[in-house]
Image (spheres, grey):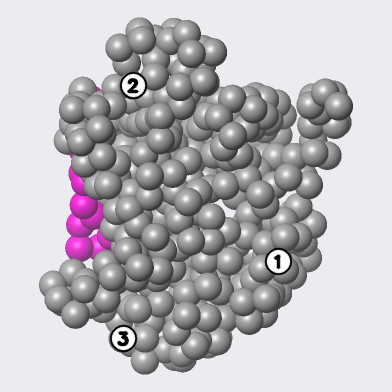
Amino acid sequence: MTSLRTEPDGNGNFGPFGGRYVPETLIAALEQLTEAWTASKEDEHFQKQFNGLLRNYVGRPTALTHCPNLSSHLGGAAIWLKREDLAHTGAHKINNTIGQVLLAMSMGKQRIIAETGAGQHGVATATACARFGLQCEVYMGAEDVRRQSLNVFRMRLLGATVHVVEDGSRTLKDATNAAMRDWMGSVEHTHYIIGSVVGPHPFPAMVRDFQSVIGREAREQCLDSMSRLPSCVVACVGGGSNAAGIFHPFLEDADVELVGVEAGGRGEGQGDHAAPLTHGSPGVLHGSRSYVLQDDDGQTADVHSCSAGLDYPGVGPEHAAWHESGRVTYTSVSDEDALTSFRLLSEKEGIMPALETSHAVAAAIEMARERSTDDVILINLSGRGDKDVTEAERLLESHSMLPDQ
């Protein structure tokens, strides 16, 4: 295992990954954001306001839940869930949007833009903007609008304008491209709330910091309820914010295995999956250097996943550093296995996971079967599955996997 850098250097690099690869027009805004974020760490008023909102508005701490029926069914390790699905808006995304909205207001910016795939970041951004009376515009690919119509309505109900992106594959990559173009032309009065640990410095480390409340709570809750730390922590990885949030506080716990789960999609062919750490190579995407899915000419490759939130050709640079250090193990799960786990957790525990989270559940299930009953596997249940029921029904039917009538 190589040395592990847990904080970026002054240029936002996690070893060979990270940095800023952006047009000159964005440099001043990124410097301003870096200064505001750095100052907020020592600002008692900011921290009191942020933590108060997490407690009284978001509903933190979220629960730690044992899965006795699923654990018994598998006959191996005990499975527990960190319940980010119980946070306000139904996913972990709200932790970050609350923090970034507070920073935007401290910088005097009243217009907020965001990208979204599964819609959970868009909903969380619209929610934070509604809470503070800010203008909100969200970019979303047309294919994701189709898959996530419930979240599109939620965003509009919350007062946000949803821009439907018809370019390219009409998914998260294309929505991010559109949001970046908007920001370059409106940077003086607009803050772009990136929803994951991707993008130019300071976004990867800043988003991770806002999401690390997940891991800090989970670590304390495990010690309180089990008098031990988990054997393994498992989280799905698209851009990687929920995984970074729960992994980071466990990095120094050498006995805790950390497993990130990418979208294996339909297979290993280019365009059939969204697993850059499994099948990609180092490259630059959306302002930072990380692992990226690329074709032979170095162009960003097409991707596929049943889950809109994992349907992205890159990953956060800190994940790339953890991957190369060996501290975090990354694997992938197919659409079919994710759908099977979507059903199984719903049936066994009465908890319906998002399709993104279902990838982590699938990996944890396979691990649990092979492990001792003394082991504990903790899954970050990053979001609830209400948003996915229509698409899940279609996919389950296409795979002849619908529940018996």
In front of the other: label 2 or label 3? 2
Residue type pointed to by label 1:
Val
Nearer-the-camera pick, 193 or 364: 364
Q: Quadrant of the C terminus?
A: top right
Q: Is residue 334 above or below residue 280?
A: above
Locate residue 384 relative to residue 202 in the image: left or right: right
**Circle 1 SS class:** helix
Residue type pointed to by label 3:
Ser
Per the rendering, the mark at residue 259 is none
Quarter holding residue 351: top right
Nearer-the-camera pick, 5 or 220: 220
Q: Is residue 71 visible?
A: yes
Q: Residue at x 63, y 45 (%)?
A: 385
Locate residue 166 relative to residue 178 in the image: left or right: right
Start-end of magenta stretch: 1-12
* Residue 218 image offset from top left, x and y in percent: 29, 41
Marks 2/3: CA–CA distance: 42 Å
Q: Quadrant of the N terminus?
A: top left
The 10 Å Cα crowd at callout 3, few under 14, some 14 to 19, many 20 or more, is some
Q: Residue at x 67, y 80 (%)?
A: 161
Q: Is residue 370 above or below residue 35?
A: above
Q: Which residue is mark 1?
A: 152
Q: Residue at x 48, y 51 (%)?
A: 86
Q: Is residue 32 above or below residue 95?
A: below
Q: Is residue 136 above or below residue 225?
A: below
Marks 1/3: CA–CA distance: 28 Å
Q: Which residue is mark 2?
A: 376
In front of the other: label 1 or label 3? 1
